[in-house]
Amino acid sequence: MKLPKDKQFNKELLTLAVPFALQGLLNSLVGASDALMLGRLTQEAIAAVSLANQVSFVMSLFLAIPGAAGVLMAQYLGKKDMNTVRRLLSMAMRYALIIALVFFSLAFFIPETLMRLFTNEEALIQIGADYLRIVSFSYLFAAAAQPYLMMMRMDGRAKMSVWISAMTVVVDMVLDFFLIYGIGKLPALGANGSAYSTIVVEMAAFAWCVIASSRKDRIRPSLREMFRFSKILEADLFKVAIPSLASALMWGLSITAHSAIIGHLGTDATAAYSVTNVATSLIQCLSHGFASGIGVMLGKQLGQNQLEKARMYGHRSWNISLWCGIANAFLLCLTGTMVYFFYVLEPLAKTYLVQMLLYNILYMFAYSFNTVFTCGVFPAGGDSRYDAVSVFIATWCIALPITMIGWLVFHWPVMVIYMVMCADEIVKVPFLIPRYRKYIWLKNLTHDDVSADVAAE
């Protein structure tokens, strides 16, 4: 289907996608700045912190539960039902804090046990456990800020969320420099210095979110509504959240499994893998930015019951994903060159790094198609089940079992293990078109009587 040019579509998409992508980039830079600073310290430090940060990564997967509220919020914003939007935002805060408390407790009280899940090297376990016990406090502030940032991205304040993320990058890099290396009278804290700086920046980001949302005309979480339950909204939330959580966990735990497998292949492989992740995380934000932008646009159109216009937006997403893939490949070439010369790595680790980066050119191209549709188009109308099914088949039924056999039985070389391990995104691409053409995602999820349900409680 050939669609006419739509300047309004392009303008609206860029208005949403660029701030989303910038915020994703800036958030990635917070983690990358730690890796950059530690990369000039020791190879063990960057490997240990990379493995330790898998704990916060797993926590971010569970934040798919409050994040699912965003799908409903976008549709109710399109319907201009602000009371329900406020209620959903408060629900998101409730679940975000519960999840953060669980992961804080694990990281603070049993950090050594968590590290042993990822590596058997005692030096990495000790560095990572000390880091985890400190950085665990940042989980509380990071989770509490997420509902505020989600609301900003939807109500036209996406630029504000970008400024908040920019602040966190600058503060984090400055604090890392002083605390990791010990400038002036400050002691050199090494990896622990990175943990302290993370706490400070997450506290600052949360404080800014609260202040920025304090105006009377802003929609913000309500403490009273956090403890009120609506059968309709809770059911709708978990109808979207459960498939989203399943897909996030299956994908995210596969990434954690990747880290655990690589972590048992030696420090050289772990360090190269960690640096590769730094490079790819800086690029993935582009696809996620456009996926989030098209998701919000589709959600608002579906909430207004503009199904034909939403269908047109879906068709345009194919071009979006194609250009994202091309941009991903180009950016990886640039970023890969920079990280290769910056990081202090052993010769074998550098060899692994080059090989991993070259393979990721193909991987990132496939990743853009999957992300735009499974994180943007499909969930906008409630079709988050496909992502869970595709991850389960491609990752847990194909890529990981073959990887485990190659690692434990046939003792394949590091790069063969890495390539098979990361083949899941490539496997999923051919199945996108048949799912798209079923138009399961073309659905209005709102209710006309939900406000009455909320008011009656």
Image: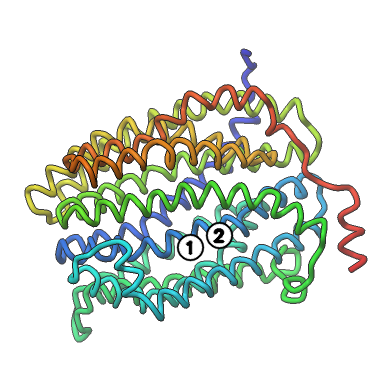
* Residue 381 image offset from top left, x and y in percent: 69, 39
Return the residue nearer the eye: 37 or 6.
37
* Residue 387 image offset from top left, x and y in percent: 55, 39
- Report how far apart the C-alphas of labels 2 and 1 lie in the structure: 6 Å
* Residue 384 image offset from top left, x and y in percent: 62, 42
Residue at label 1? Answer: 59
Q: In the rendered view, does 171 fall on the left or right side of 287?
A: left
Q: Which mark is residue 63?
A: 2
Q: Quadrant of the C terminus?
A: bottom right
Residue at x 77% of width, y 43% of height: 445
Q: Amino acid at mark 2?
A: Leu
Residue sitting at the far left: 347
SS at mark 2? Answer: loop
In the picture, residue 359 is in which quadrant?
top left
Return the residue nearer the eye: 175 or 312.
312
SS at mark 1? Answer: helix
Q: Quadrant of the N terminus?
A: top right
Callout 1 crowding tier (Cα within 10 Å): few <14, some 14–19, many ≥20:
many
Q: Dots 2 and 1: beta carbons under 8 Å? A: yes
